[in-house]
Image (cartoon, rainbow, N blue to C red):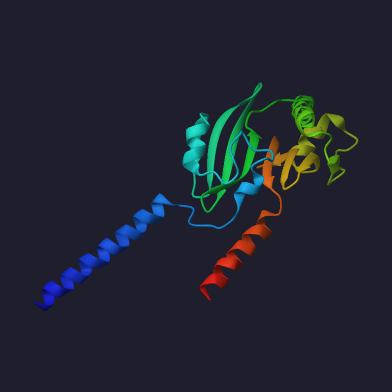
């Protein structure tokens, strides 16, 4: 009789754990009281609303699917003649950041800066003049050798950067080194989101105290 009771208890535990795992998988982001609705009228990344789930993104962005992680989704498509990786980042299952990253070798420095300026001009048409627009030398080793400026970019010596702010949304573009190769990176993200997350987490803890 005692053995039967142990088996029943074991089965109850299995059912409970399985149910908890299923519930977690159905809601990988967990619950949050963060108010994403206040971003409804602000710039979005690829027309995907801030706070959207991975499933929503996959239903509404038909780009080629490359990789899915716990907190990100990587797709592939094109911006004009540029092949780009498109990455959505998630917090508790909610979309909070999006990026474009060039993946192809464009050859000469002049090709990279041409595409960078083209994308920057398109962003300027949409969001106005950037708040910051700079060409920054972290190391001047190749500054007087224009024929080696692509090497300077690859080594992190040279970076071009510009960004725009639309209330709580930041849009930026950077020509610099990514994994030791020259790349153009465009980012859309919620400004000061780390602080927002800290406040939200604290509020949840306070409710449990």
Please report the residue visible at 64 percent of the width from the left and 35 percent of the height from the top.
Answer: 100
Residue at (21%, 65%) from the top-left corner? 11
Q: Position of residue 115 (x, y in %)?
A: 74, 26
- Relative to 38, 91 lies left or right: left
Image quarter of the N terminus = bottom left
Hey, which quadrant is residue 125 in on the image?
top right
Judging depth in this view, the residue of 193 and 77 nearest the camera is 193
> Please, is residue 192 above or below residue 206 in the view?
above
Considering depth in this image, is 151 or 46 the residue closer to the camera?
46
Return the x and y of residue 116 as percentages of the image width and height: 76, 30
Instruction: Give the residue at x 26% y 63%.
Output: 14
- The answer to which image quadrant residue 194 occupies is bottom right
Task: Find residue 159 and report its horizontal and vertical position in percent.
Answer: 79, 40
Between 134 and 194, the residue placed more toward the observer is 194
Q: Which residue of the protein is positioned furthest toward the left in this rendering?
A: 1
Is residue 159 toward the left or the right of residue 204 in the image? right
Classify residue 46 as left or right of residue 69.
Answer: right
Report the residue that reaches farthest toward the top. 81
The answer, for residue 22, to whether it is visible in the render is yes
């Amino acid at each position: 009789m005692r053995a039967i009771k142990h088996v029943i208890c074991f089965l109850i535990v299995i059912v409970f754990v399985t149910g908890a795992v299923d519930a977690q998988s159905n809601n990988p982001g967990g619950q949050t009281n963060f108010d994403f609705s206040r971003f409804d009228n602000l710039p979005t990344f690829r027309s995907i609303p801030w706070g959207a789930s991975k499933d929503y993104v996959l239903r509404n962005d038909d780009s080629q699917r490359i990789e899915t992680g716990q907190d990100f989704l990587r797709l592939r498509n094109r911006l004009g003649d540029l092949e780009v990786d498109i990455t959505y980042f998630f917090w508790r299952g909610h979309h909070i950041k999006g990026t474009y990253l060039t993946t192809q070798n464009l050859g000469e420095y002049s090709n990279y800066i041409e595409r960078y300026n083209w994308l920057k001009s398109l962003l300027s048409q949409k969001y106005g003049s950037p708040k910051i627009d700079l060409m920054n030398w972290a190391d001047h080793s190749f500054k007087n050798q224009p024929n080696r400026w692509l090497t300077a970019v690859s080594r992190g010596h040279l970076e071009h950067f510009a960004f725009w702010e639309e209330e709580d949304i930041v849009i930026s573009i950077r020509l610099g080194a990514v994994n030791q190769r020259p790349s153009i990176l465009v980012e859309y993200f919620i400004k000061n989101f780390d602080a927002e997350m800290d406040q939200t987490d604290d509020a949840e803890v306070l409710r449990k105290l």
